[in-house]
Image (cartoon, rainbow, N blue to C red):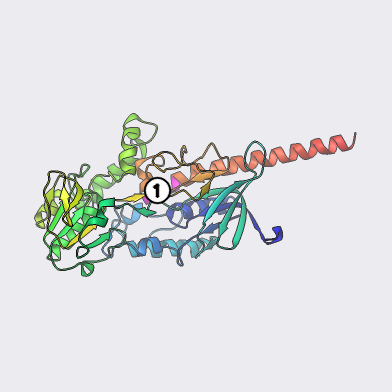
Amino acid sequence: MQDTAVERRAVAVIGAGQTGLAASHHLARRGVDHVVLESSDRVGDVWRNRYDSLLLYSPARGSELPGLPFPLPRNAFPTGRQMGDYLERYVAHYRLPVRTGMRVRCLRAVGGDGGPAAFELTTGADRLLAAQVIVASGAFQRPRVPDFAARLDPGIRQLHSSEYHAPHQLADGPVLVVGLSHSGADLAHEVATAGHRTIVSGRAHGQLPFPIDSRRGRFVAWPLLRFLGGNLLTLDTPIGRRMAPKVRRGGGPLLRIRRPELESAGVDLRAERTVDAKSGRPVLADGTVLDVANVIWCTGFRPDYGWIEPSVSDAEGWPRQHRGVVDEMPGLYVMGIPFLYAFTSMLIAGADRDARYVIDRVAALAALRAAGARSGAEETRAVANG
């Protein structure tokens, strides 16, 4: 491919979710040339394609990106579809340079002595060169399902939480929900309410004393959660550093559907994990074999950053970074990671602060490189003039 066919940009943002759009907003305000590449055909589809009954854990007042109010009452909790539509509206409102249907298949550092001069992004047959890149592709990338799932009876209907939309997808008969975090609690409550005998396997990682969408939740728990999650539970505090790995593995506390709501719906809560298959049936850690017709795997996701070259991932698959800055590869940044800096990084409420920090570093590096280029040009002219 001829070099003339390669597009060049100052900054490329990968992903048009809430963090990518917050970054784009601040880049646009600073007048920085950039483009946002979104793999979905429509902005917001990552939210629209989740289970139909999904409600955010932050009210409308805490689900806004900088500059645009959410078109709902301030204390209402948006649905996933409403969140997707809001993101699409945000792009249109600020005329952000988003291109949909653009999946980045490879991101590679190229050129430069003492650090990359640019990054090459490959999307199918097209290539783009950017001086700096913000990877905001999100944490929900590769569904995590245990290997023994393949040994379950083919007659058992298996769905990962990313594939589940509504109870009509299930076969008649009992349902095993594996994993008791946010999606596990939500889906177990829904299928039990729909009439399925429902078993949940696994322990919760704590819970609020009352549901997040109750009156006390809206006016007491949410403001407190936002304050503590943004100020105390950060990577700058010992408690935050201890909590971060658990949150990244899917260990957040139950916020809306908690043990009392599950028990009221008739859900059979088993603290033992699902660890194996025997004669085609799921087996709990205590040896109990469960006769079920369905399994919903609420077992989270694996990070997938293997398309970045050279690798910047740690042993757990997460990029090695500090507050989104990948120090070992100047000009590369990541956003949208659970606990990027604080507990609120996993909430929309934390997107703006994370974006501001990263864009400040983008601007600082651009200024440093520009100053270096000017200095180099002046030195060259001085030599040439003798």
Badge count? 1
Asked if residue 349 lies in the magenta stretch, the reply is yes
The residue nearer to you, when weighing 181 against 174, is: 174
Relative to 314, 155 lies left or right = left
Q: Secondary structure at mark 1?
A: loop
Residue 8 lies left or right of residue 75; in this view the side is right
Q: Which part of the image, by quadrant, shows the N terminus? A: bottom right
Please indicate, yes or no, whether residue 72 appears anywhere in the rendered image.
no
Residue beneath the point at 34% across and 29% down: 238
The percent position of residue 207, horizontal first and vertical second, equals 20, 44
Q: Which residue is mark 1?
A: 303
Dividing the image into 4 quarters, which one contains the C terminus? top right
Question: Between 18 and 115, which is closer to the camera in this rendering?
Answer: 115
The amino acid type found where label 1 is placed reads: Pro
Helix, strand or loop: magenta stretch:
helix
Per the image, is 52 magenta? no
Residue 133 seen in render: yes
x, y percent for residue 235 = 39, 34
Write down the region rendered in magenta. Answer: 347-353
29 w.r.t. 231: above or below: below
